[in-house]
Image (spheres, rainbow, N blue to C red):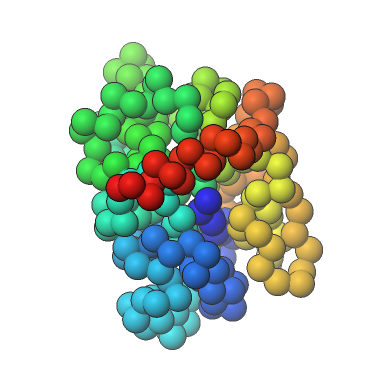
Amino acid sequence: MCELFGVSAPRKIQLNDLLDVFFSHGDRHPHGWGMAFFGNHSVQVEKQAVASTKSARLRECCSHLIMADKMIAHIRLATKGNMEYENCHPFIRKDDTGRAWTLAHNGTIFEGEMTDSYFYVQEGQTDSERILYLLVDRMNGRYREKGAPLDAPERFQVIDELICQIADGNKLNLLMFDGEYLYVHTNCRNSLYLSKRQGGYVFSTVPLDGKEWRPLPLNTLLAFQDGKLAQAGTDHGYEYVEDPEKMRLLFLDYSTL
């Protein structure tokens, strides 16, 4: 599967050492890399459909000092969707209020009744991008009902409800950012960790150094703001346990693309 990396901190911290280790895993996740940095109500994205270990562009990016208080990174091992720029994470989509939503996903949607219809309108072919389309549609629907932009607790409630609805049977390791909250979710045991750094948190699919890393709580959406836990959602109970036969068929299907 893919690997995720994220940061929520009260001030910018130096990330070069952690990112060097993270992106060194690209030989095992060779189908693309991406980074999203956030600041002043803007999103800056760098991504490529090439292994992170073979990308001259990424080497150039990481040769400079990287300081961030909010960011998301991803390396891709494809299960659905070709090796193309449009299928590289993170994905960005704006809701009807102009708020930009950024999402990176490690996992697979096996039960896609709620997301499959977006296949015909999305830019790429991944099930991950379809999660973002569904999320933004839910935000837009709640915005129309209210007649005003949603505040942070209301946005959290929409996402919490959605994850509870789509987690059953699906692997949903997610990092999302809405300009205010960094949302974090895992329903697969020991596949997303956090580490306390300089008053904030760093998140990663696997520990990246010898400091303390703890597995995130299972099956519960968390939202962080400036390095502090802002909200915790419902324990939906839908832990994902990998089915070797499903994964074999999935990779067999991908090999024919």
Residue 68: image x %, image y %?
49, 67
Residue 41 visible, this orientation:
no
Q: Residue 89 vs residue 95: left or right?
A: right
| 208 sits left or right of 164 in the view | right
Q: Nearer the viewer, residue 157 or 152?
A: 157
Looking at the image, which is closer to me, 76 or 237?
76
Answer above or below: position of 30 versus 225.
below
Outermost residue toward the top?
145
The residue sitting at 21% across, 31% down in the picture is 120
Q: Quadrant of residue 118?
A: top left
- The answer to whether residue 48 is left or right of residue 17 is left
Residue occupying the point 48% across, 62% down: 29
The total number of labels drawn is 0
* In the foreground, 178 or 176: 176
Q: Quadrant of residue 188?
A: top right
Q: Which quadrant of the view contains residue 83? A: bottom left
Camera-side residue: 176 or 82?
A: 82
- Check the image and report above or below for 238 versus 85: above
Identified at 44% across, 57% down, the residue is 76
- Residue 229 position within the rendered picture, expressed as x and y whole percent measured from the top left: 65, 44
